[in-house]
Amino acid sequence: MNAKRIQLDRRRALRGALGVVVGLPLLDAMTDGRGRVLFGEARAATKPPVRLLTFYCANGTWTDVFFPKTPGPLTAATTSPLLTPLGPGDGAADMFPYTTVVGGLSSDHYNKTGHNMACFSNGIVSPVADAKPTGPSIEQVVAAELGGQTRIRSLQLSAANVNAPISYGAGGTPMPPIRDCKTAFDTLFLAAGPPSPALQAARARKQSLIDFVLADAQDLEGRLGAADRKRLDEHLTGVREIERALKSSNGQCTMERPTAWPVPGADGSLWPWRPLERANLMFKMYVHAFKCDITRYASFILTSGEESFPTLNSDMGDHELSHLDTRGPFERRTVVKIGFLASLMRQLAAEREGDGTLLDNTLIFYGSEIANGRLHEKFNLPLIIAGRGGGVLKGGTYIRVPDKTPVTNLYCSLINFAGLPVPKYGAGCTGMLGGLS
Amino acid sequence: MMRARLIGIALALTGCTGVVAPTGEDPPGGGDERGGSSGASVVTGVAGGMGGAGIPTPAACKGHRDVGTSVMRRLTNAEYAATVRSLLQLPAPPTVPLAPNTSKSHFPIAVEQAFTPTITDGYMDAAAQLATALVADAPRRDRVVGCQLATKGCLRDFVERFGRRAFRRPLTVEETDRLLALAAGDGQSGVEAVVGAVLASTKFLYLAELGTPEPGSNGVVQLTEWEQVTRLSFLLWGVAPDDELLDAAASGAWGDPRGRAAIVAAAIEDPRARAGQRELTRAWLGLDDVIGLPRDKREHPLWNPALAAAAAEETQRFVDDLMWRDGASFAEALTSRSTFLSEPLAKFYDVALPADGSRVTFPSGVRGAGLLTQASVLALSAGTELNTPIKRAVFVRHALLCQELPPPPPNVPSIDKVTLPANATPRERLAAHRTAPACAVCHNLLDPLGFGLDEYDAIGAYRTKSAGGQPIDASGTIEGVEGGGDFRGAAELGALLAKSPEFGDCVAQTLFRFATAREADTADECTVASMQASFHASGLRYPALLGAFVDSDAFRLRRMP
């Protein structure tokens, strides 16, 4: 399989006189900037980039009702019970044509114990409970190489009720998600809109603070041992990323500022997980961040393990429930979780981009590091790839790979589909996954 | 001093097949078996991580100076908030979005701290906002600045004083000049720029302990006096050192052994130590998780955020009292019949609340085992009807005895429902489970202990019948604990645990972990052993334990990573 060609830096062509990067909706970028539509080679050079989003739900599911009965076309007629939210119904668009279900992948060839969220999208971690990654998660592999083309290198959000991350940077540094919607919005969209004197002044003050912090840290840098200097450098890398984001702008493409922010627990419900409001607002932010090309690489955590589901009138913690032999309530929760995926897919599919939709140019890697939560199985993982990744995936299919195929092979394929040639990622990566495209 | 107290469990491929075994005496630095793939995994101290070694004898530790490796750490969120409050004379700790605690253990372990641009940005924005808010509040600004800005030399004087507090050492000439260069405009905007820059500086946010190299010991440094008073202040008070402590470093008072002892004693007595040690309680018992703990509304209609918050606060006040009341022994943590309640919890426990909010002594023994019979601990350690005894036993082993059990082996057999009648009790089901050899050894250490707390449901309410309507049998046996044995109910279980040396040892290990923000390694064995010995010798008085840590190598020395 050939590695997909790395996209040209679309922004380079749009760089203004002040060196400020201006983001435009990609639909506009399909023109030459004077309203003329580009064709042929000029058009190919502006092919929209592939976005990669990892989407995690804890505790796995009952895989016998997750996977369709037989491999082949995935449609409303062939769907499994748990995948039905992706299909047509109630006037909702059919998302099966954008869905690739992959069965047979394992994070280990036998049953290892416990949970390890980090394993969901990281090939450089042992699938043993609580083992810590020593390398980056898949979207960070891509972000490290290609993320510099957008204002925000990568975006981690979570609607879950704890801070646990699924994204890890170089060396396995945990990258905790933003859980507060307002912080997420300000990070992504505050730089949008027409420049005002107040905004300029705030930027100048921040630049001066950045200059100070970088200069001041030099005293320390020379005196620290190697390990401590690495930690300081990680902080200073953050400062430089802020500086980069400060010097670029979102241009006019933005998301309307919400008038109210869902705060955990503020709805009067007993428990702080408010999936509906928080996840839906975060989905809107992903859609706009992708559409406006503010970022291309992202991760999302819907649930991290202990959430209850008040809307299902089901108050038991998700992890507890996953261990019961009573299947119904936990199956219903999986349907809710996949319903969230379907909702995000429909929003991406509603945005036109190039010849197709934003979903055509996106890869969402959905699932859990656990197959059947009852026994912490790590084989036959319930995984979905949503979107078509710029045309590398056809969608509308359930693919069954040979049992015990390492899930790291899928990671390599996803990294590759997102635009990066990967000779090797993680110890178990034995090759690209055949049959996907 | 040698005690047979570590439980050895051989973890064979098919599961736990080991036995409770005493471990031998190892010299310091010897025999770390953690993570080994030899087929034997030793249940080790969680906080101490004593690595499968026995307890070093005092003789082996005499003259032995060593310390485990530590990395430069960022201030914890609590330290940051308390320090900023003190520096800027804020009426309350600021609420600014900082780094989430990504440590699984609730302890802010330094090597688990996360770095992302979002986190860095949070510190930069917080610095700018706090500075802007300061200059907008003229009376507070004047108090913080401490001189008339119009006066010549005031700004330089402020930069030097404020910088010394924030960096916990005197500024270099270059640092002072760099800050003054930012303060070009009028006095007010100068103060804003200086305060913002200092709070955004990595020298404020990180504890860079450079020390001075120890002669002849590779990679070990002795902390400077500035760094030592800084450790003392963050450990005891959870906040950066005040001017008085910094003056003690500057004047040499800290360097003089007698002067130092007096300073330490006064710092332990200082009321600020109460606030500082509340952080240890929160991390130790995971109290932040009580609020937000999901419980089925139909099964537990009484459980709500107000009750959860009251339960967490009860435990905080209870442990505060154990730490600081004259003559209090930590053994009471597991035996006390009295506590401190607020309205919702008094109602829940069905006991009268004294009008002055003071100590409540329960009339019956139903709440007679200190932490073990408090709603916070009982709720946190509960799960389903069937696995609650297991989870509670794991809590006792982990948090109160610092014993870590291996995770369940691969391919655990499911509890066989077919061979048991439908109305079998959880105890009968778990007993059947234990007939499988793969499950027996670990669960023999867990289930009988957990049933001791079975008279309390998943929110800690007292009950005489299980959810299935069967009478509760709260009798059991503790294995793997010195002086363990049979008990019936929480009070007898608590009394056995409180008497065991493992409990006091575990509190000492917990403090070590809290104080160093890291796991102990073999180089720390003498430090941990000396803390444990001092704690036991004092009759489990918490101030004595704090003093023992401050006297240890792990306090004064640092091994560079």
Image (cartoon, rainbow, N blue to C red):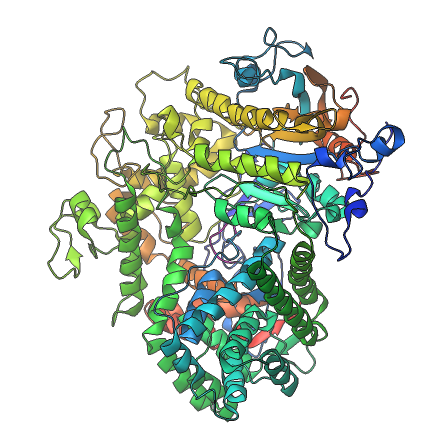
- Looking at the picture, does residue B262 appear above or below residue B70? below
Dominant SS type (magenta)? loop
Left or right position of B255 against A386: left
| Residue B55 drawn at (x, y percent) | 51, 63
- Looking at the picture, does residue A409 appear above or below residue A397? below
Left or right position of A170 against B2: right
Left or right position of A106 against B316: right
| Residue B547 drawn at (x, y percent) | 41, 75
Q: Residue at x 84, y 35 (%)?
A: A45
Q: Is residue B105 magenta?
A: yes
- Looking at the picture, does residue A230 appear above or below residue A332? below
Quarter of the image where the N terminus of chain B is located = bottom left
Left or right position of A347 against A20: left
Q: Which residues are magenta?
A: B103-108
Q: Is residue A6 magenta?
A: no
**Residue nearest the observer in this picture, B203 or A105:** B203
| Residue B75 at least partly seen | no
Residue occupying the far top of the picture? A77
- Looking at the picture, does residue A100 appear above or below residue B257? above
| Residue B376 drawn at (x, y percent) | 31, 47
Residue occupying the far right of the picture? A41
**Residue nearest the observer in this picture, B211 or A192:** A192
Quarter of the image where the C terminus of chain B is located = bottom right
Q: Residue at x 63, y 81 (%)?
A: B181
